Each structure stands twice: as structure tokens, then as C-alpha cells.
Amino acid sequence: MKSAVKTALASYGMSGQVFHGPLLKVNPGFEVICIQERTKTLSKKLFPGASIVRSYAELLNHPEVELVVVNTPDHLHYSMAKAALEAGKHVVVEKPMTLRSEEAEKLITLAEKNKLMLTVFQNRRWDADFRTVQQVVKEAKFGRLVEFESHFDRYRTYVAPNTWKEEGDEYVGVLYNLGAHMVDQAVVLFGMPKAVTAHLRIVRKGGVVYDYYDIRLEYDGFAALLKCSYLVKDPGPRYTIHGELGTFYKWGIDPQEELLKAGHLPTGQDWGAEPPEEWGTLIYEENGEEIEMLVETVPGNYNLFYDNVFEAIRNKADLAVKPKEVAGVIRILEACLQSNREKCTVALL
């Protein structure tokens, strides 16, 4: 195996502790050698041999660092990813890639100019439920697609204090958080939509950023509906797919995030697997007969993201998460904001 990619984490908050840290820890293709923590030393638990720096400039000046993971608040993604690329580092940037599509295009141009890898941590492409949906859509036993519906609902009546995710302008809130995942999944499945209609709201008392969205993506012959609310006490199906000949339902949500939050490292044959009671249901017609069947969940595996990053850096493999594709996701999020502001449908194609 080629040498491990010497890696730095730009922060060690929630995403560093729960996602990037554990994933990099168990992947032999990476060696975390530098972490920015402004005041604490929390990363010593997982990476006792890594240097802790107090400034981003110090991190970028580290001569051995090859890859920088920009896992900071959203409004810093563009400037910090740009600085890393200018310093000659490969970059993994958290979703959303940037707040504006023009910023995403500038990063793409810079990475290409400097012959560096740039990709985005769209980890929910490797959710168990979404991997299963990809399989179901590909097999298309439900016939011609009529409507695709995806939900990412939560029940959180309070507004968390002292967090950047709960304060700011229209670029802060669930649209650029969970919406960046859900729109990305729709683009992976179906490509860029022809048009977007979006309704954004604040549903929690005391809230100041959007915590609800209802997005409609128009495609040829069908629509993709993406919904999220922080006030859903009893969620319905995570995915519902209606076709001319049948319907697919998938309840529940991928187990990986909760396992990582509980301190489990992403290892073992059962990682990301779901028990049979969590499997989806497909009901369809075939040769005049109605068939109802369970669809075994494809195990989730966020490790595959960093496996691909290693291959891209060391062996010039194609990226699984292509930055141009994700720039399209940012265009859709911008169209959602425009649609909500102007109360209209925004054409994209």
C-alpha cells in the first residue's frame, strides 16, 4: 500500500469528534498529524501523536501536511478552503461546499489550476437507507417513476443557545444543513432538476433561522419532494417512492451517526447494518399479480468516502463526490432561497 496521506483537521468540534476524526483514525490510508484547537486539547484522546496548533496559519505552514479537512462553520468554508489550496494542500471541505455557487466555482478553478484534489464530505451518500433507495430506483420494479419523497424530520422544541447554527441570515439553518444532504441525494439519483419551488419557515418559538423546508424539484415526468421540520413528534417514512406499478417505503434512519456519537469507531463486519425490522417495503404489480416484499437494507458505510479520497490522491482515481456536481447542489439551494423570497418557481434548465 502507498504511504498514508498526512492530514490536518481545521477544527475539532462536533464534526471533527464524531465524523472526520473516527473515520480517519480507522483508515490506514491517512495519518492525522495536525489539528487546530483554539483553546482545548480534546483531540489528544484519539490522536495522541498529532500536533495541536492554535491558528489556521500555523496549520497551513506545517510542511508535512498534504490534506486539510475544512470542517469549520459554513461561512468559513470558502476562505479556508481557498487558503489551503493556495498553500498547496489537497482539500476535503464539509458540506455545504460554500454558501454561494460562484464561490464553489472559484474553488474548483483554483484546485484545477494547482493540480490539487478538492472534494466535499457528502457522507449521506453512504447512508444505509439512501444506498438502498439507489438500488430500488435502479431496479425500478415500481415501474415508471411518478413521485419521489424524502423526509429528514426531527423533534427539537428548544433553540440551542450559543451555536452558530441557530443564529444568522438565510444561509444559516436547515436548508444549508440537512438540505445540502437531501438535495445532493436527489442530484445523485436524478441529476439537476428543471425547476425548483421552495417554502421555508421558522416553526419553533424563539427561532431566528429556518427550521422547516418544503422543496419541490421538477424533472421530466416526475417530481422529487424534499421535506424537513424540527417539530415532527412522530415521523412518517424516511423515503416514499411512487411508481406507475407500485410503491416503496423506507422508515427509520441510518444508524451510523448515533453510533459515532456514542463513541463507537466505524469498524467491524456489522458496521452500518440494520436489523430486518428496519428494512423497507416494496409493493408492486407484476403480470397482474400484487407482490409485497421486504427490501433488505444495504449497510451504510461512511468509510467509503475516505477510501475514495485516498485513491484519488495516491492513485489519481475519479472522485466519488465531484466538486462540479456539488456546485450544482449549491445552485439549487440558492434557487430555494430565491423561490421562497419571491414566492415563485425558479427555472434551472
Image: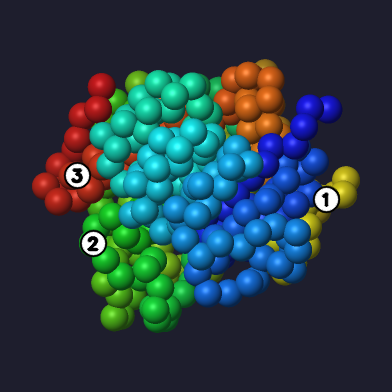
Q: Position of residue 17 (x, y in %)?
A: 63, 63
Identify the disc placed on residue 267.
1
Q: At x 88% / y 45%, what residue is drawn? A: 269
Q: At x 55% / y 66%, what residue is drawn? A: 37
Q: What amino acid is at disc 3?
A: Ser
Number of residues whose C-alpha sits closer than 10 Å to that of mark 3, classed few (under 14), some (14–19) or many (20 or more): many
Q: How is the image coloured?
A: rainbow
Q: At x 25% / y 27%, what residue is drawn? A: 348
Number of residues whose C-alpha sits closer than 10 Å to that of mark 2, classed few (under 14), some (14–19) or many (20 or more): few
Disc 3: which residue: 339
Q: At x 33% / y 54%, what residue is drawn? A: 75
Q: What amino acid is at disc 1?
A: Thr
Please give the count of numbered marks on the rendered protein.
3
Is residue 341 found left or right of 90 in the rendered image?
left
Disc 2: which residue: 169
Task: Label 1, secondary structure: give it.
Answer: loop
In-front residue for pair 288/180: 180
Q: Earlier in the sequence, mark 2 or mark 3?
A: 2
Q: What quarter of the picture does the C terminus occupy?
A: top left
In-front residue for pair 159/151: 159
Q: Nearer the viewer, mark 2 or mark 3?
A: 2
Task: Label 2, secondary structure: give it.
Answer: loop
C-alpha distance separating marks 2 and 3: 16 Å
Task: Label 3, secondary structure: give it.
Answer: helix
Q: What amino acid is at disc 2?
A: Asp
Q: What quarter of the picture does the N terminus occupy?
A: top right
In-front residue for pair 231/11: 11
Q: Position of residue 121 (x, y in %)?
A: 54, 43
Q: Is residue 169 above or below residue 239?
A: below
In-front residue for pair 145/284: 145
